[in-house]
C-alpha cells in the first residue's frame, strides 16, 4: 500500500469534499463553508489533483460524483464524523447523560465529610455518573494523579507534588471526645493534668503511636498513653463510646457522630492549630471539561 504523507496534505480539502458530496454544487458547497465560489472551485481542483480523478462532473444542473468519489466518500465522511465526535467529547461534558466514572483519592474522614453532599448533588444533576473512592499514600499521590489512577485527591497537602494544582475546601480542627457521663469530665471540661493521665485512642496511617497532640504535649514536657491505634478514623467514636478511652478527632466527624455514639465533646486543654483540607489534581486534567465539573461538584 502506498504511503501517504499527511503533513503534505491540506486536510481541509476533505471538508470541501464533504460539502461537495452533500450539495453536488460548487455554489452550495461554498455557501456551507462560508467561502467564495472561486475558492471552492480552487479546492475542488486541488481535490482532483490529490485523487487523480474528476470526482464531481457536471450533469445538468448538478455536479454528479464519479465512481471514485462514491468509493472514497464513506471513508472520508466517517473520518470527519469521528474527528467531530472526538472534539465534542473532549470539549464538552453533559452530566445529565454521562456515564463517566470518576476515581477520587480519599480517606474515610474526607469520604465521610464530603461524599454525602456530592452524592446528593450528583443524584439531582448527574444521576448516571459513578464514583470510585480509592485510598492512597501521600508520597504516591502525585504519581497516581499523573497516571490517571485517580482524578482528584482529597486531604491535607502541606507540600503538593509537582505538576499538581490545589484548592482549599474547608478548615478543620481537633475536638475531644469521651463517652457520656465519663467521670473525668467536669461540666463538660477536662483539665490538662487529667487529660494526660487518661488512656487515649489515636488514628494513624504510619503504624506508630504519635500524633499532632503528642507533639504539642512534648513541647510542654508532657506525654500521654496511647492505648489504641487504628488506621480507620470512623472506628474511634464507637470505641470511645464503649470504654473510658478519650480521643482527639476532627470536629466534623465528632459533631455528626456524637448523638449516634452517645459521646460528649469537649475542648482540648492544650492549644492546637487548625488545618486546611484541600483538593488536589494534575495539571494534565486541569482543562478537561469532565474534570472541571467534578471539581466544581466537590
Image: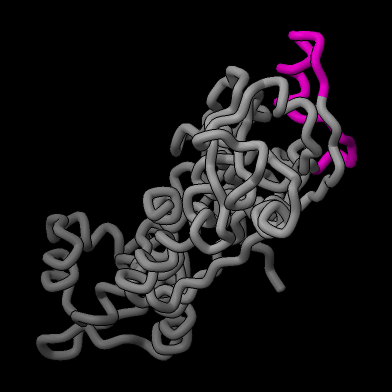
Left or right, residue 55 beside residue 42? right
Q: Quadrant of residue 30?
A: bottom left
Rendering coords of residue 250 (x, y %):
57, 40
Confirm whether residue 144 shows in the render. yes
Left or right, residue 4 beside residue 165? right
Q: Quadrant of residue 34?
A: bottom left
Q: Residue at x 81, y 9 (%)?
A: 221
Q: Is residue 221 magenta?
A: yes
Observer-nearest of 71 and 38: 71
Instruction: Tell which residue pokes out farthest to the right in this image.
Output: 207
Rendering coords of residue 288 (x, y %):
45, 50
Would you say the magenta stretch is mainly helix, strand or loop? loop
Observer-nearest of 284 and 245: 245
Quadrant holding the N terminus: bottom right
Q: Is residue 153 magenta?
A: no
Left or right, residue 67 beside residue 219? left
Q: Is residue 7 above or below residue 21?
A: above
Observer-nearest of 232 and 153: 232
Confirm whether residue 53 shows in the render. no
Instruction: Tell which residue pokes out farthest to the top in this image.
Output: 220
Q: Is residue 59 above or below residue 83?
A: below
Q: Quadrant of residue 269?
A: top right
Query: Which residues fall within the magenta stretch?
Result: 205-223
Q: Residue at x 53, y 25 (%)?
A: 274
Observer-nearest of 156 and 27: 156
Q: Is residue 195 above or below residue 282?
A: above
Q: Residue at x 41, y 90 (%)?
A: 67
Q: Residue at x 52, y 72 (%)?
A: 130
Rendering coords of residue 206 (x, y %):
85, 38
Rendering coords of residue 245 (x, y %):
75, 45
Amino acid at each position: 500500500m502506498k504511503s501517504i504523507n499527511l503533513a503534505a496534505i491540506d486536510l481541509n480539502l476533505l471538508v470541501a469534499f464533504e460539502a461537495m458530496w452533500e450539495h453536488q454544487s460548487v455554489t452550495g458547497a461554498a455557501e456551507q463553508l462560508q467561502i467564495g465560489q472561486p475558492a471552492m472551485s480552487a479546492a475542488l481542483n486541488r481535490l482532483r489533483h490529490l485523487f487523480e480523478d474528476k470526482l464531481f462532473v457536471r450533469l445538468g444542473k448538478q455536479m454528479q460524483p464519479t465512481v471514485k468519489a462514491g468509493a472514497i466518500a464513506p471513508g472520508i465522511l466517517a473520518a470527519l464524523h469521528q474527528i467531530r465526535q472526538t472534539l465534542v467529547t473532549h470539549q464538552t461534558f453533559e452530566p445529565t447523560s454521562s456515564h463517566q466514572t470518576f476515581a477520587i483519592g480519599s480517606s474515610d474522614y474526607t469520604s465521610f465529610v464530603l461524599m454525602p453532599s456530592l452524592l446528593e448533588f450528583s443524584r439531582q444533576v448527574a444521576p448516571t455518573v459513578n464514583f470510585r473512592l480509592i485510598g492512597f499514600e501521600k508520597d504516591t499521590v502525585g504519581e497516581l494523579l499523573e497516571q490517571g489512577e485517580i482524578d482528584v485527591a482529597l486531604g491535607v497537602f502541606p507540600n503538593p507534588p509537582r505538576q499538581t494544582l490545589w484548592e482549599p475546601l474547608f478548615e478543620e480542627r481537633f475536638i475531644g471526645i469521651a463517652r457520656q457521663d465519663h467521670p473525668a469530665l467536669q461540666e463538660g471540661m477536662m483539665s490538662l493534668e487529667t487529660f494526660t493521665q487518661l488512656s487515649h485512642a489515636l488514628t494513624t496511617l504510619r503504624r506508630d503511636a504519635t500524633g499532632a497532640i503528642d507533639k504539642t504535649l512534648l513541647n510542654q514536657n508532657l506525654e500521654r498513653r496511647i492505648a489504641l491505634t487504628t488506621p480507620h478514623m470512623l472506628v474511634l467514636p464507637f470505641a470511645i463510646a464503649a470504654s473510658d478511652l478519650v480521643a482527639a478527632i476532627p470536629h466534623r466527624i465528632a459533631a455528626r457522630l456524637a448523638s449516634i455514639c452517645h459521646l460528649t465533646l469537649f475542648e482540648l486543654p492544650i492549644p492546637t492549630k487548625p488545618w486546611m483540607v484541600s483538593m488536589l489534581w494534575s495539571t494534565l486534567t486541569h482543562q478537561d471539561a469532565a474534570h472541571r465539573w467534578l471539581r466544581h461538584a466537590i
